[in-house]
Image (spheres, helix red, strand yellow):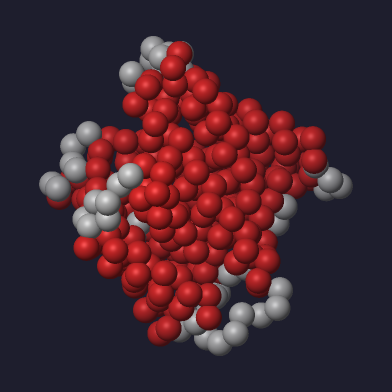
Amino acid sequence: MSPAVVAAVLGSAVLHAAWNALATAIPDHRVASALMGAAFVSVAGVGVCLVPPPDRASWPYLAASAVLQSAYLLLLVNAYRRGEFGKVYPLARGTSPLLVTAVAVPLLGDRLSAGQLAGVAVLSVALCWLVFAGGRPAAGSWRGHALALTTGVTIAAYTIVDGAGVRQSGHALSYALWLFLLQGLLIIGVCLATAGLGFRTGLTLSWRRGLLGGVLSLAAYAIVLWAQTRSPLALVSALRETSVLFAVAIGAVVFAEKITAQKVAATVLAFAGIALIKVTA
């Protein structure tokens, strides 16, 4: 990887952790999701007019992924209401490669390399350690952890769906833009349909953070797409997971979460496990 690609992917990791932090800072998870959805629709709505449409064969995958990614965002921002940012983020990100690797063996017939097996073991230990770092989790945090794990399941699901869908699309950028557009529309619809008291007030108070979070999410994804055209996919994907390290730092600086040696060690170990799984694939 060239220094420019490394710097770009690290920047993408920072942006990814940053938009998650912005979503965390908005008290109502529906408000956060709706505002991010609005940003997706605004940017992707223009983008789809500038690229050819994806092939018809990819549309079922697009529809399925839009539902899964909408569920992912709604689950994730809700998890942040229930647990620590510095724990929820690595749990959600770390569960996904663990599940994708596990599913690839029985369903897709893949064989795991020694490095991948080591990565699975390291990541499993790291995620358990992260949950229990600093002692038994507080009673109220279990729901946040459960939501984070469920978020990881949805990430794994849409990763598998998109892996098949983008190959059928004939145009990766077009697929991504249509996915963001469909996802944004679906999220806005769900949030409006389930909005409670104070939703409109929340939109007024948080629109800057929410829209910025959506734009940062799009920018982070665009950088990764660009990097994947210039460097091996496994290296780009693994380096991007440094976002789990940035998330712990953001949790400490922005949300005044306590940094312990155990939490830092568990997070670094989780990153090492993800990197092993992806680089040795």
Residue 27 located left or right of residue 213: right
Tell me residue 277's x, y (percent).
29, 58
Residue ID at (51%, 58%): 92
Residue ID at (60%, 85%): 136
* Residue lying farthest to the bottom in this orientation: 135
Residue ID at (64%, 47%): 74
Q: Nearer the viewer, residue 68 or 185?
A: 68
Residue 120 located left or right of residue 135: left
Q: Classify 60 as above or below 150.
A: above
Res. 275 image quadrant? bottom left
Residue 280 located left or right of residue 155: left
Q: Nearer the viewer, residue 273 or 266?
A: 273
| Numbered label tally | 0
Q: Nearer the viewer, residue 36 or 154?
A: 154
Res. 66 image quadrant? top right
Say if residue 119 shows up in the picture.
yes
Say if residue 100 shows up in the picture.
no
Q: Classify 108 as above or below 229.
A: below
Residue ID at (50%, 68%): 86
Res. 266 image quadrant? bottom left
* Residue lying farthest to the left in this orientation: 2
Tell me residue 113's x, y (percent).
22, 57
Tell me residue 177's x, y (percent).
45, 26
